[in-house]
Amino acid sequence: MRCSRGISAAALALANVVSASLVHISAYTGNVTTYNLTATTSEISTQAALRSLDVSGGCGDYPSWLTLAGDILYCVNENWPDPKNGSLSSFRVGPEGQLTLLSNVTTLGGPVYAVIYGEGKGLAVADYGGGGINTFNISDPANITPVQAEVFTLTAPGANPQRQDIPHPHQTIVDPTGNFLVVPDLGADLVRVFALDNATLRYTQTTPLQAATPGAGPRHGTFVKGPSKTFFYLVHELANTLVGYEVTYNADGKTLGFKEVHSSNTHGESAVLPNTTAAAEVIASPCGKFLTVSSRFDGTLTVPNYDPSNSTAIPSDPLITFSIDLDTGALAHRQTRAAGGVNPRQFSFNRDGTLVGVGLQSDSRTVLIARDPETGLLGDIVEAVSVVGLPNCVIFDE
Ligand SMILES: *[C@@H]1O[C@H](CO)[C@@H](O)[C@H](O)[C@H]1NC(C)=O
Ligand SMILES: *[C@@H]1O[C@H](CO)[C@@H](O)[C@H](O)[C@H]1NC(C)=O
Ligand SMILES: *[C@@H]1O[C@H](CO)[C@@H](O)[C@H](O)[C@H]1NC(C)=O
Ligand SMILES: *[C@@H]1O[C@H](CO)[C@@H](O)[C@H](O)[C@H]1NC(C)=O
Ligand SMILES: *[C@@H]1O[C@H](CO)[C@@H](O)[C@H](O)[C@H]1NC(C)=O
Ligand SMILES: *[C@@H]1O[C@H](CO)[C@@H](O)[C@H](O)[C@H]1NC(C)=O
Ligand SMILES: *[C@@H]1O[C@H](CO)[C@@H](O)[C@H](O)[C@H]1NC(C)=O
Ligand SMILES: *[C@@H]1O[C@H](CO)[C@@H](O)[C@H](O)[C@H]1NC(C)=O
């Protein structure tokens, strides 16, 4: 990964750099769509355009997350109407952006996230509705086979019984060594920790991290590697807090240590945010100098209407950016910027960090926001497209 603008100043001074790549978007009740992204980056501005190339219904009616491995796109179907049932599909992405369905297998209920592990041969799914995790052997993406499936239990509902009725794993994350899988569990107030075995693709559950406060509801996290230390930043959906930990690798080779190095609300303050707010995503920038968080239903910001003839502003939730002290793990608030609409459930950065793709689930819209990789600051909204259904995942395919 590059740590700064991938284009030399000399190249920029000579001409604008034009690039073409793909963007994949999933949406509840709206299929998976692949777009052609053309972007022009110059020293002073970025322009971008998305054009639809192909759409597939092969991930069922409730696609909720996309994971890319080379030219294979994996998609999980959360299947809302039946939270006990879900599916995982694989597609080959053709050179013209065509999506060819290769395989479709059943998962535990309500899958919402998938990550690759085990030297590219394993895929681990977080099954929110079903309260467990599933792992698969994806050595042959056209013949996905189950490895392990496990449903977790609670002895009693959590501090927020409505949302913490049962365990709700929300994400599967591989640590920077590739040897651990960590799973924020919103229902159980835990980050579950698993030691991975690449040879068998199997996992073993070890000591979890307990959420800092009961009812916090861990949702998404991200690892950041400094020159000597490793950090883990965790967003809690129910408490709307952002907590950072220094991670240590214990001598047993099977467990992780976590020492708190940052704690704030998702806006970088100490106040308790209203419980109508729902923190969603946390992403570290390429090379880990910055962290960006999305918060939902804040109702505090607006953006100009996307229809220039309409003067009514559009309500927007924020994306909040922090800089990371890579020696201590401490975070400093840098910017709170409108995400472009309501419910930025997920967002991602392109490879050189010059664009942010945001799925605005409540607005049936996806936007691209320009970003300065040197400062971590988000700039103008450079493209906005209407998406059929409720867009919940936007990934770059470069
Ligand atoms: C979604 O896919 C299904 C099946 O391929 C198709 O019938 C439907 O028209 C698609 N919906 C959209 C919004 O493209
Ligand atoms: C994938 O499998 C699930 C569960 O078996 C099923 O409900 C769904 O219709 C299948 N999707 C496709 C596109 O075949
Ligand atoms: C899940 O879907 C499969 C395949 O469509 C079906 O056979 C099974 O009954 C479903 N399970 C539940 C709990 O609905
Ligand atoms: C994407 O658009 C660019 C610029 O118009 C074009 O050169 C390229 O062939 C397109 N790619 C695909 C896959 O359509
Ligand atoms: C297991 O695979 C990961 C890549 O998925 C790699 O980073 C890690 O070093 C491997 N572990 C061992 C013990 O070889
Ligand atoms: C994974 O599947 C492949 C076939 O696609 C098989 O050769 C391999 O042994 C499997 N790996 C494990 C760990 O089961
Ligand atoms: C949110 O806060 C209100 C007012 O304090 C309270 O009545 C309500 O129970 C809270 N809801 C949840 C889900 O915690
Ligand atoms: C203008 O935009 C607002 C906010 O999106 C919308 O509610 C309204 O219907 C729009 N008016 C017209 C005339 O399109």
Image: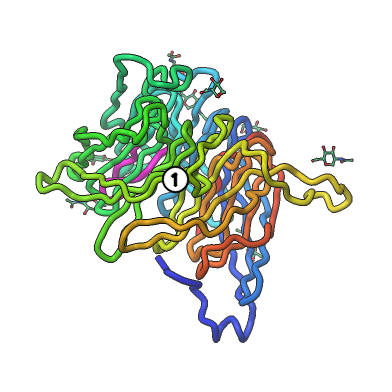
Q: What type of secondary structure mainly makes up the magenta span?
A: strand
Magenta stretch containing residue 394, yes or no? no
Judged left or right of residue 383, residue 283 is left
Q: Quadrant of residue 197?
A: top left
Residue at 66% across, 71% down: 45
Amino acid residing under circle 1: Ser
Residue 277 against residue 357 in the figure, above or below: above
Q: Position of residue 267 (x, y in %)?
A: 53, 47
Q: Quadrant of residue 213?
A: top left
Residue 173 against residue 284 in the figure, above or below: above
Q: Indicate the secondary structure of the residue bearing disc 1.
A: strand
Q: Is residue 325 visible?
A: yes
Q: Which corner quadrant of the figure contains ligand 8?
A: top right
Judged left or right of residue 302, residue 294 is left
Residue annotated with mark 1: 264
Q: Is residue 105 visible?
A: no
Circle 1 crowding by C-alpha within 10 Å: few under 14, some 14–19, many from 20: some
Judged left or right of residue 121, residue 219 is right
- Residue sitting at the far front: 271
Residue at 10% across, 44% down: 252
Residue at 30% across, 40% down: 182
Read off the magenta span: 113-124
Q: Position of residue 129 (x, y in %)?
A: 44, 23
Magenta stretch containing residue 115, yes or no? yes
- Residue sitting at the far left: 252
Residue at 45% across, 60% down: 323
Residue 157 against residue 344 in the figure, above or below: above
Which residue is at the front of the view, 300 or 315? 300
